[in-house]
Amino acid sequence: MPTDAPSTDSAAGSNAPVEPDFDTVVVSGIQPSGRLHFGNYFGAIRQHIDLHSRHEAYYFIVNYHAMTTVQDADALREHTLDVALDYLALGFDPEEAALFCQSDVPEVTELMWMLLNLIPTSRLEKAVAYKEKVNAGLTPNAGLFTYPVLQAADILAYQGTLVPVGADQKQNLEIARDCARWFNHTYTPEEPLFPVPEPHILDDVAVVPGIDGQKMSKSYGNTIGIFDEGKTLKKKVMNIVTDSTPLDEPKDPEACNVFALIKLFADAETQAEIADNYRAGGYGYGHAKKALLQLITENFADARARRKELAARPDYVHDVLKAGADRARATVEPVMAKARELAGLVSAR
Ligand code: ADP
């Protein structure tokens, strides 16, 4: 570990310019940990899709990371393919950017090893996600402890400059920024190999509420899946918790979970119309729920149809992931060759 490592980044999120020599490269990892929900969509996916066609971009399904908690091989396989189908159905265009499985670029684990030898253990002990697990009485495995370093390797291997992250991921990005600085400082002070990546903080969409009014999250079992439909979707929407104001009385739309969701799906005019109905009275929560159901169904009808089409073409999905992996490896291989050389790893290959 370098004794005179550069100071720890306390200002991640600052908008200091990235190294001018590096072009914008967007990198983002997506967890294959179950079916995606509307919290994920409005809090992350929508912006991932928007960014991927504007810059060189690498989006990987982080199956190595998922192994820290998922040790059921069938479940991991299924979740990985689900994420690929979800992103393709929601508008990810494989012509524009690379979508692939993290484990198809095993070089990232090699870079992780290099970085692990530069980062002080104390830096990882302070990571919030790790501390939360320890405080909750769990015995985290070593994978979970080193999780942010694999994330750093994922970003640096592509010489990523821009990382779309939710507020909950900012600390891990600070670790990635430190890893870039430590590597550069140790091996290439004159000509940095790695840009110091910048966070692209995802729009501060107010937290999307789940059907019980808490934050929508897999862990709370209160989600509405992006691809839920029919009876399942209807049941979830009808079960959204509301207060017991009688139908005739005026209601405050801003205090209602149903309206919070309506706002995400409806255009300004429809929102204003529904808000007026709330305030006028004679409009019950049942009416609002029907309006929401219709909005969800209409907004995602195309994506739902496309997902079904894609699910029936596993070879196509495989080909997309393979092409993405080929593109990703072509980017990573020269970077890793340079990293090995700089670190003094002799190769006789
Ligand atoms: P979960 O809580 O269901 O496990 P994740 O932690 O995997 O969801 O979420 C991945 C990303 O999706 C988060 O980093 C965040 O940007 C976004 N996200 C998840 N849930 C919500 C929510 N309820 N509201 C807004 N954004 C969310």
Image (cartoon, rainbow, N blue to C red):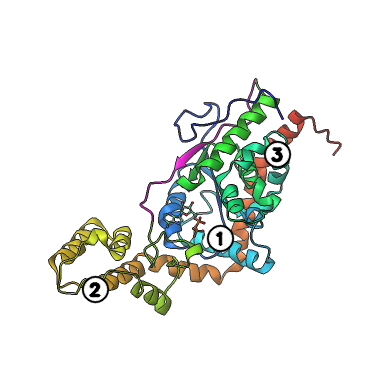
Residue lying at the far right of the rendered structure? 348
Residue 250 visible: yes
Q: Earlier in the sequence, mark 2 or mark 3?
A: 3
Pointers 2 and 1 in contact (C-beta within 8 Å): no
Q: CA distance from mark 2 to mark 1?
A: 35 Å
- Is residue 118 inside the magenta stretch? no
> Which of the two marks, 2 or 1, is nearer to us in this view?
2
On residue 116, the disc is 3
> Which of the two marks, 3 or 1, is nearer to us in this view?
3
Callout 1 amino acid: Ala
User: Where residue 164 sits in the image (x, y, percent)?
Assistant: 48, 44
Q: CA distance from mark 2 to mark 3?
A: 56 Å
- Secondary structure of the residue carrying tag 1 is helix
Callout 3 amino acid: Leu
Q: In the image, what residue occupies the spot 66% across and 41% down?
A: 332
Q: In the image, what residue occupies the spot 48% across and 47% down?
A: 168
Q: Earlier in the sequence, mark 2 or mark 1?
A: 1
Q: Earlier in the sequence, mark 3 or mark 1?
A: 1
- Front residue of this view, candidates 293 and 141: 141
* Whether the residue under disc 2 has CB within 8 Å of ligand 1: no
Q: Residue at label 1?
A: 84
Q: Quadrant of residue 117?
A: top right
Q: Quadrant of the N terminus?
A: top right
Q: CA distance from mark 3 to mark 1?
A: 30 Å
Residue lying at the far left of the rendered structure? 280
Q: Residue at label 2?
A: 287
User: Where residue 69 sits in the image (x, y, percent)?
Assistant: 64, 59
Q: Residues within 10 Å of mark 3 (few under 14, many from 20)?
A: some
Residues rendered magenta in the picture = 190-207
- Is residue 194 inside the magenta stretch? yes
